[in-house]
Image (spheres, helix red, strand yellow):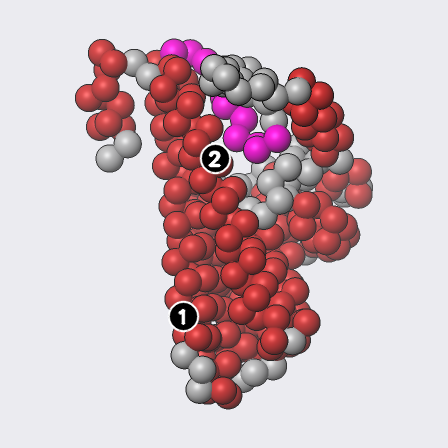
Amino acid sequence: MRTYSLDDVYETRKRRDSWWTVYFVDPVACRVTLPVANRTRLTPNGLTVFSLVLGLGSAVGFAMNQLIAGAVFFYLSFMIDCVDGKIARLKGTGTPFGLWLDYVGDRIRVVLCAGGLAYGQYALTGDVSYVVLGAAVAVLDLFRYVNAPQMKRVREAIREERQEPELDLDPLSPDPLVPEPAEPLGRAPRPRWFFRLFRRLNRFLARHRVRSHLVSGIEFHAAVFVIAPIAGAWALIPLAVASGVLLLANEVFLVYRMWLFTRRHGVGSSQESREHVLV
């Protein structure tokens, strides 16, 4: 059996990832991946199931008002979830079923933890705001992870029609397919240094493998299920609301960029066929 090095594991990291993963999870996940790959026969699917079990432990901790324990279990669950992807890429053992299991497992973990957090705080305080919080977190997560693949299908359908390169939906990344919108008459044009600054920032983040999304789904989960519980019960609602607003703002921006892309590259003659693809 091949012996892998830490450099081999580093090669399995995504080209660009969320800042939470790059700085707070990958450094641990890569070092856990190395002994798992070299000394065990654990499969990516087995690790996904183990991640889900840890997620259940997190939900139980939250339900019992053990916030720090719940946060630690959630972090470990997400870290193992990163390890399973690295093992799959390292050994070439990933499967379509594994992708489905990983995706569904993530959604189950979030729903269980949101429910556990809401139940634990409501049982302790009787404040219905925590029930609303749990429902809102679950719905927002579901929207984020239903919206993302649908946007991808729209882009793929149009790229297939036009044979265009894939659209980068990183908010700070300039899209070569969508020109910068012209300023309305009578309004002073935006300074070019503004765009150069964002391009330089995006290149800097790219060199460090960081996507320019301030709050994506991963950061949202980290804020609600790791940072806020460690900070204390007082932080649960404020941090969940703040991260949820930022996540929605990010999603609106991505939808806006996709709309610009579709408006520029939509094909009227095949409208019916593209709509059929998206059903």
Provide the secondary structure element on which disc 1 rests.
Answer: helix
Residue 80: x and y in percent read: 62, 57
Callout 2: 10 Å neighbours few (<14), some, many (20+)?
Answer: some
Which mark, by number, is residue 132? 1
Q: In the shown orientation, is residue 37 left or right of residue 142?
A: right
Determine the main secondary structure of the stretch shown in magenta.
loop
Q: CA distance from mark 1 to mark 2?
A: 26 Å
Is residue 153 visible in the rendered structure shown here? Answer: yes
| Residue at image location 60% in from the left, 40% down from the top | 213
Q: Is residue 166 magenta?
A: yes
Residue 233: x and y in percent read: 60, 77
Is residue 108 visible in the rendered structure shown here? Answer: no
Q: Is residue 43 magenta?
A: no
Residue at numbered disc 2? 254
Q: In the shown orientation, is residue 192 left or right of residue 152?
A: right
| Residue at image location 47% in from the left, 15% down from the top | 185
| Residue at image location 45% in from the left, 62% down from the top | 137
Quarter holding residue 231: bottom right
Three-letter code for the amino acid on which mark 2 is drawn:
Leu
Three-letter code for the amino acid on which mark 1 is drawn:
Val
Is residue 69 depicted above or below 220 in this figure? below
Residue 104: x and y in percent read: 42, 54
Is residue 218 depicted above or below 53 in this figure? above
In this rendered view, identify the residue nearer to me: 138 or 239.
Answer: 239
Q: Are marks 1 and 2 in contact (CB under 8 Å)?
A: no
The residue range painted magenta reads 162-172
